[in-house]
Image (cartoon, rainbow, N blue to C red):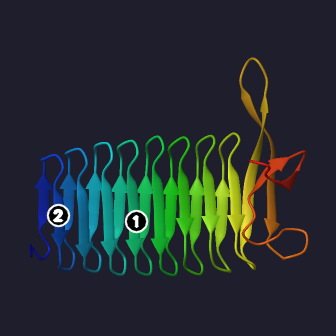
């Protein structure tokens, strides 16, 4: 399908959509939709469960809003955002961002100067190249990174009344104190290796 600089809205379930053109916008509202756009500055939004939003091209944006969904991009300056339970974001490209706002979810970047941000509990933020930042903000969340990347994790005080931030821990993956490709969580004001 070719629709340059157009907006396409799809409401069917279990549909595969492929678009090859620049600056195309796609909104898919059905369940189990697989949407792929190949073109710079394109945007995809999926709303229902078990859907996949994939875009390849510089400056592309994908947003997956349903549970168990995936938002992924291939290209520099791209963004992948997922907002629901057990969903995932993955970016391949420099200066890209993977942002996760769902519980039990994962944000991963595989390009330099990129950011992986996980905001909810029991989630993972992971960066696979140097000069990138993995940031886990939720309770019981984990971070990991490549040599030369930075890790940020929040430690929470979980008392009976409410959750409170206890510490925010920042460390560089130097290969000595903080090892590459190892999961860490914030505990007692420092990053500690995860057992689970």
| Residue 111 rendering spot, x and y as whole percentages | 55, 79
**Image point 25% across, 68% down: which residue?**
36
Report, in whole angstroms, how far the alpha carbon at label 1 lies from the one at label 2.
Answer: 15 Å
| Residue 63 rendering spot, x and y as whole percentages | 35, 56
- Using the image as rendered, state which of residue 86 and residue 39 is in the foreground: 86
Q: Of helix, strand and loop, which one carries label 1?
A: strand
Mark 2, residue position: 17
Q: Of helix, strand and loop, which one carries label 2?
A: strand
- Using the image as rendered, state which of residue 52 and residue 7 is in the foreground: 52
Do the residues bearing badges 1 and 2 touch, measured as CB atoms within 8 Å? no
Q: Residue 120: which quarter of the image?
A: top right
Mark 1, residue position: 72
**Image point 39% across, 41% down: which residue?**
67
Q: Relative to 3, does residue 191 appear above or below in the rendering?
A: above
**Image point 28% across, 55% down: which residue?**
45
Q: Relative to 167, does residue 81 appear above or below in the rendering?
A: below
Is 188 on the left or on the right of 124, as rendered? right
**Image point 40% across, 65% down: which residue?**
72
- Using the image as rendered, state which of residue 92 and residue 160 is in the foreground: 92
Q: Relative to 167, does residue 164 appear above or below in the rendering?
A: above
Q: Which disc number belongs to residue 92?
A: none
Mark 1: few/some/many CA within 10 Å (<14, 14-19, 20+): many
Upstream in sequence: badge 1 or badge 2: 2
Mark 2: few/some/many CA within 10 Å (<14, 14-19, 20+): some
| Residue 144 rendering spot, x and y as whole percentages | 70, 63
Q: Residue 71: which quarter of the image?
A: bottom left
| Residue 133 rendering spot, x and y as whole percentages | 66, 68
């Amino acid at each position: 399908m070719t629709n340059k600089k157009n907006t396409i809205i799809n409401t069917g379930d279990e549909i595969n959509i492929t678009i090859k053109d620049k600056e195309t916008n796609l909104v898919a509202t059905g369940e189990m939709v697989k949407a792929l756009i190949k073109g710079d500055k394109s945007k995809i939004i999926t709303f229902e469960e078990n859907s996949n939003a994939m875009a390849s091209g510089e400056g592309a944006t994908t947003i997956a809003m349903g549970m168990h969904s995936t938002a992924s991009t291939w290209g520099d300056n791209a963004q992948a955002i997922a907002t629901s339970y057990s969903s995932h974001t993955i970016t391949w490209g420099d200066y890209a961002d993977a942002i996760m706002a769902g519980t039990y979810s994962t944000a991963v970047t595989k390009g330099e100067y990129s950011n992986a941000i996980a905001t909810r509990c029991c989630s993972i933020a992971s960066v696979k190249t140097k000069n990138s930042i993995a940031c886990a903000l939720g309770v019981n969340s984990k971070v990991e990174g490549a040599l030369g990347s930075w890790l940020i994790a929040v430690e929470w005080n979980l008392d009976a009344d409410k959750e409170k931030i206890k510490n925010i821990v920042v460390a560089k993956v130097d290969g000595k104190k903080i090892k590459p490709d190892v999961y860490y969580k914030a505990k007692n004001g420092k990053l500690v290796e995860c057992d689970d």
